[in-house]
Amino acid sequence: MILSSFSYLKLTISGSKLQKEQKKSLTSFIKNWFMKSFTFFFLFLITLPILAQQQQKKTNVLFIIADDLTATAISSYGNPASQTPHIDKLASEGVKFTRTYSQFPVCGPSRASMMSGYYPHATGTFGYVSGRENIGPDRKMWPQLFRENGYYTARVSKIFHMGVPGDIEKGSNGTDDEASWTERFNSQGPEWTAEGESELVQGNPFGLKPKKGGNVMTIVKADGDDLVHADGKTAAKASELIRKHKDKPFFLAVGFVRPHVPFVAPKSYFQPYPYQQVVLPPKVENDWDDIPLQGINYVTSVNGQMSVEQEKKAVAAYYAAVSYLDEQVGKVLQTLEEEGLEDNTIVIFTSDHGFHLGEHRFWMKVSLHEESARVPLIIKVPGKKPAVCHSFTELIDLYPTVAQLAGLEVSEHLQGESLVKMLDNPNHSVRDIAFSVSVYRGVEAFLLRSDKWAYIQYAEDAKDGIELYDMQMDPHQYNNLADFPQYGEVVKDFQQKLKIKIKEVRTNDLGLKYP
Ligand SMILES: [Ca+2]
């Protein structure tokens, strides 16, 4: 019994010792576990925002494109008559490119080239199509690359070709590329049928004809507010999408249709531009005498039977349409700012091609002269300093540039050049010459634009004529030097350069037998 109690005691003693030791080891285990867990938890806590930030750091893309907007109608591009405060603000915050050229100064082929990354002569895309037909199902359009890399991609209104005003009146897709978009939205608008004070200033010599639709200069000083028209709706939808998708990476393409004809805007936008005060480009005597027939644009003051008053009204209405567009651009950029996305979003602003506003008595596009072929281009990248870049750039460069900025790999066959180095150093250059083409009355035209020269050739064998302008001495292109013997060598040199360029463009992975 004693023994047993001793034993019990001993057992108890040793049991308590054991318990103590167990307790000690348990305490140290808990301590250890707690310390480890705490360290882990602490590390987790401090890493969390970094991880979240990294997730969030995937850069968004806001691509804004106007339709038929010439650089000469933007205040910050040197036109004191026009009022474009929102585009000007963006230009002051980003890199403003002063010598960017459209690949084809007509909506359809310009956009097909820009979105696919191939020149028109590589794909044979010269019409009102998306360009998908000619690159096949396996090559990726610019937004499609982002879509396939985890981005939400959306189109609001006209990015690939849409007929203006036709497709806008109907609210239809135009010749879109469906594979590019997660979602797409059209902005229907009344266009030339909008209520208000209207006037047709082309093909209306006696002023007796009413307004009409189609590709003509109809002006409407419209009743109602911004939201009556397609571009107002586009800005509202774009703002809605920015708010809705701000937490995940997005590629938002916002396509405005002004200042494309018809020149329709709420009437308040016309107030700053009384047509009587418009100063038209000088009418130089015999201006057309040294321009080959192919170089006389398809719409002129002559075939449009436009009086000086109608010319002034057309310019004033174009500026009003530009100011309306500018206001809509401002709304989208303001949403980006309000949502705190400015530090995480690349913003691009451009146009598909330029527009003649009476220079040489030419109107509209197609022409390869400066006002029609050159476009505005602003690229604002978070963290990069504002700058002005005078190096030659082309719309085809946007695809590889923006993909590189977002860290996405592009096909080695893309024909544009990345402009990323220029965003850090505006003196950097990726090409000495910009290249653009056009087709009019079945004849192809080619532009080579160098620092000193603008060389325009009609037909691949030049049978329909050549224009050569000294852009330093004659920036408005009044004196065609091509036929002067002393410029024979310059012409010969450009002919050779053009041959090489066309061959280079046609040498690609598409396997097209063109022409
Ligand atoms: Ca256009």
Image (cartoon, rainbow, N blue to C red):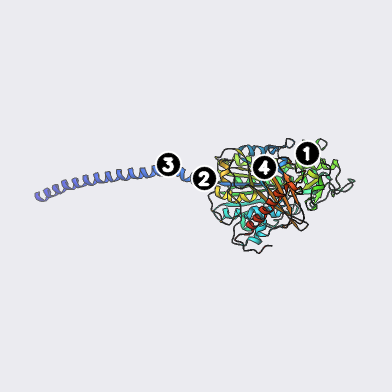
Q: Which residue is mark 1?
A: 270
Q: Give the secondary structure at mark 4.
A: helix
For marks 2 and 3, give the CA distance: 17 Å
Viewer-proximal residue among 444 and 267: 444
Q: Amino acid at mark 1?
A: Phe
Mark number displayed over residue 329: 4
Viewer-proximal residue among 90 and 419: 419
Q: Position of residue 173 (x, y in %)?
A: 69, 56
For marks 4 and 2, give the CA distance: 24 Å
Q: Position of residue 338 (x, y in %)?
A: 60, 39
Q: Does the beta carbon of the residue at mark 2 sit less than 8 Å from ligand 1?
A: no
**Height in image: 383 above or below 102?**
above
Residue shown at 56% from the left, 44% from the top? 421
For marks 3 and 1, give the CA distance: 56 Å
Q: Position of residue 264 (x, y in %)?
A: 77, 45
**Height in image: 313 above or below 443?**
above
Residue shown at 75% from the left, 40% from the top? 319
Q: Give the secondary structure at mark 1.
A: helix
Viewer-proximal residue among 52 and 147: 147
Question: Which of the marked residues, 4 or 1, is nearer the chain's N terminus?
Answer: 1
Question: Which of the marked residues, 3 or 1, is nearer the chain's N terminus?
Answer: 3
Q: Which residue is mark 3?
A: 46
Determine the residue located farthest toward the left in the rendered image.
Answer: 2
**Height in image: 92 above or below 67?**
above
Where, quadrant-wise, is the C terminus in this rendering?
bottom right
Question: Which of the marked residues, 2 or 3, is nearer the chain's N terminus?
Answer: 3
Question: Which of the marked residues, 4 or 3, is nearer the chain's N terminus?
Answer: 3
Please give left or right for residue 431 compared with residue 303 in the image: left
Q: Nearer the viewer, mark 2 or mark 3?
A: 2
- Badge 2: residue crowd in 10 Å (few <14, some 14–19, many ≥20): some
Q: Give the secondary structure at mark 2.
A: helix
- Badge 3: residue crowd in 10 Å (few <14, some 14–19, many ≥20): few
